[in-house]
Image (cartoon, grey):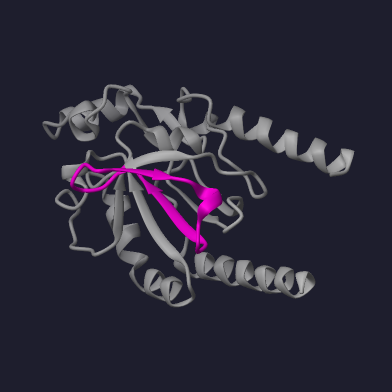
Amino acid sequence: MSFLRMALLMGSILLCQLAGAEIYDESNAVRPLLPGMTVPAFTVKTATGDEVNIQPDAFEKPVVITFFRGGWCPYCNLHLAELRHAEAELKSKGFDVWFISADRPERLYESLTEEVDYQLYSDGSLEAAQAFGIAFKANQRMHEYFAGRDLTLEGISGDDKDGMPVPATYIIGTDGRVHFQYTNPDYSIRLSPKVLLAAAEAYQEDADKRLRRNR
């Protein structure tokens, strides 16, 4: 390995470590993983509470991962509904499609306003959100929102970290690297399904080019 490639690799590892180092004070301060960065291993839970250890460098298929705040969030419910057709098309193109929520396992499906058959994972501990650099602390306004609905963030997540993820979508390649990333601190603005599908097509085109070069 050349000195330049080694330096780039070490730089990417350092940036990745910095990105997932903490729960940031506010949504505008998050430092999400960027295209080209390696995704670290992380653990999530299924709706039945079983732990799933995710090793991105061992993916057999590219994976589309969407982080959302939880079933209590009306914007998240709308976005999940919008992604129905995109999910089916992504799967037909050979992608796995996952949705990761800060809700505790037993709330994953029951808290949603619409019935979905998505693959949902719980990240109540914010381990995955921290790994991707998108975890931030809930502010007073959010706590007032929960209190007005007889909820608490700890009750929703099952954890006392007092945080949540910035809504985000990633395409992770079979090389364990980020190939597409979208985050927006404004939770009311979500990624368009059309843009996501275009990004998935771009990933496939790049993957085809890499395959031809390696033959």
> Residue 127's spot in the image, x, y percent?
40, 33
Q: Position of residue 122 (x, y in %)?
A: 29, 43
Above or below: residue 93 compared with residue 22: below
The residue positioned 78% from the left and 40% from the top of the image is: 8
Q: Quadrant of the N terminus?
A: top right
The mark tally for this picture is 0
**On screen, residue 195 above or below 122:** below
Left or right of residue 103, residue 213 in this image: right
- The quarter of the image holding the C terminus is bottom right
User: Is 70 colored magenta in this rendering?
Assistant: no
Residue 170, given in percent of the width and then of the height, sits at 51, 53
Identify the residue shown where x is 31% and y is 24%: 162
* Residue at 32%, 59% in the rendered image: 80
Judging depth in this view, the residue of 147 and 153 nearest the camera is 153
Nearer-the-camera pick, 45 or 133:
45
On the image, the x and y values in percent for residue 210 come to 73, 68
| Residue lying furthest left | 150
With 2 as the anchor, is 169 left or right in this view?
A: left
8, above or below 22, in the image: below
Foreground pick, 39 / 188: 39
Depth order, front residue of 174/109: 174
Per the rendered image, the range of residues in magenta is: 45-68
Q: Confirm whether the magenta stretch covers residue 47.
A: yes
